[in-house]
């Protein structure tokens, strides 16, 4: 197993350095006569967003998202998540620097699929999801990648704010804290960015989309809680399998009803067009359960991000149990 782990780390390092080798400064790409007008406009918008992130949100002023890389594929990495057949708690993998996380990422889809197949053979529920962007936590200057450019400028702003927050503050091994913090900054930052630009109509659309996403999150949370109760019930395994199928069928039906008025491409559409299982639900708590606590911290300093980050650093210095109670507990 140690040899396999070592091979995985070497493959990951090779993929990371291949990505970094493809970087070109955004200013260079913008000036290049061969650059399409559409790409030029998007990268100029990225530069504006990037400057806003530092100026107004207090996020790191470094070389990240000031270069562009084309990896000539749809996703930059693919993440594998595995959870036992009768558990909503995902398997954890531990790495240097980042600590333990509930996924394993691959730069090559076939490698991700092979790894996923091994866990399926052991009876685990598995998901393989393409990822358009990720952060090296400030260890390298992360580029804007072509995989990100199918998004709207609002989505680009959100991901830049999110990933720069990871660079600003990251607690190894505490995914719930890290992801909820970045999600909070992303949501508040996008609203502030749209307001500054006088884009009130776009802000209304964005708020409606956020509400739709939270409706889906609540459905997923409810399903996760229902499955957790089932798995701890002590029922015969075959009976649990039957109930599990019924619970996921009810989730699909509830999603279809909720998303029907939202138009094309509602949030989490790709999940519901594929096979739903425990692995899909594993990350819900990671990203969202602690967001209300961080929102309270931001409100306590009247939206001043620099004061907010000071409060968050103090929380990060606490032991994990105390930190979790302070941020993720109910007020």
Image (cartoon, helix red, strand yellow):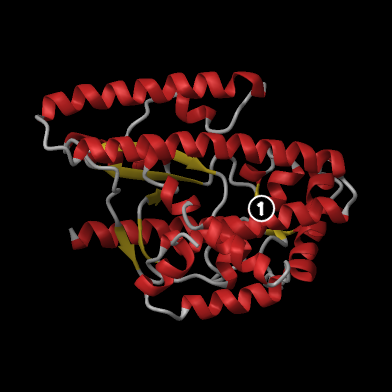
Q: Which residue lies most toward the right here? A: 198
Residue occupying image coordinates x 23% and y 56%:
4
Picture quarter containing residue 308?
bottom right
Q: Which residue lies most toward the front here? A: 331
Give the quadrant of the N terminus.
bottom left
Picture quarter containing residue 3?
bottom left
Residue occupying image coordinates x 36% and y 20%:
249
Tell me residue 225's x, y (percent). Answer: 34, 40
Residue occupying image coordinates x 35% and y 25%:
248
| Side (left or right) of 144 relative to 128 | right
Tell me residue 267's x, y (percent). Answer: 58, 33
- Please name the residue that numbered disc 1 is placed on: 187
Tell me residue 119's x, y (percent). Answer: 23, 40
| Side (left or right) of 307 relative to 283 | right
Q: How many marks?
A: 1
Q: Nearer the viewer, residue 241 or 173?
A: 241
Picture quarter containing residue 63?
bottom right
Tell me residue 214's x, y (percent). Answer: 56, 40
| Side (left or right) of 233 relative to 18 | left
Residue occupying image coordinates x 14% and y 24%:
239
Q: Secondary structure at mark 1?
A: helix
């Amino acid at each position: 197993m140690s040899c396999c782990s070592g091979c995985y780390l070497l493959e990951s390092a090779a993929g990371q350095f291949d990505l970094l080798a493809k970087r070109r400064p955004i200013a260079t790409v913008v000036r290049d006569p061969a650059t399409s007008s559409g790409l030029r406009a998007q990268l100029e918008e990225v530069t504006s967003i990037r400057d806003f992130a530092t100026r107004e949100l207090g996020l790191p002023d470094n070389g990240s998202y000031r270069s562009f890389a084309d990896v000539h594929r749809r996703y930059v990495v693919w993440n594998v998540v595995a959870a036992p057949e009768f558990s909503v708690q995902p398997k954890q993998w531990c790495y240097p620097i980042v600590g333990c996380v509930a996924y394993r990422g691959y730069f090559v889809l076939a490698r991700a699929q092979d790894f996923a197949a091994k866990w399926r053979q052991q009876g685990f529920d598995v998901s393989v999801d393409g990822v358009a962007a990720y952060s090296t936590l400030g260890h390298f200057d992360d580029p804007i990648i072509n995989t990100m450019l199918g998004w709207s400028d609002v989505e680009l702003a959100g991901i830049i704010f999110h990933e720069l927050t990871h660079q600003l503050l990251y607690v190894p091994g505490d995914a719930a804290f890290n992801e909820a913090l970045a999600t909070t900054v992303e949501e508040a930052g996008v609203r502030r960015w749209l307001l500054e630009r006088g884009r009130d109509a776009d802000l209304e659309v964005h708020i409606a989309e956020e509400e739709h996403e939270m409706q889906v999150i609540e459905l997923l949370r409810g399903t996760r809680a229902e499955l957790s109760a089932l798995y701890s019930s002590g029922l015969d395994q075959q009976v649990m399998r039957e109930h599990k199928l019924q619970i996921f069928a009810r989730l699909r039906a509830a999603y279809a009803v909720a998303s029907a008025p939202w138009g094309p491409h509602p949030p989490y559409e790709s999940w519901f067009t594929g096979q739903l299982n425990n692995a899909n639900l594993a990350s819900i708590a990671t990203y969202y359960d602690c967001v209300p606590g961080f929102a309270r911290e931001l409100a306590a300093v009247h939206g001043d991000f620099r004061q907010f980050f000071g409060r968050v650093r103090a929380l990060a210095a606490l032991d994990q149990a105390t930190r979790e109670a302070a941020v993720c507990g109910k007020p």
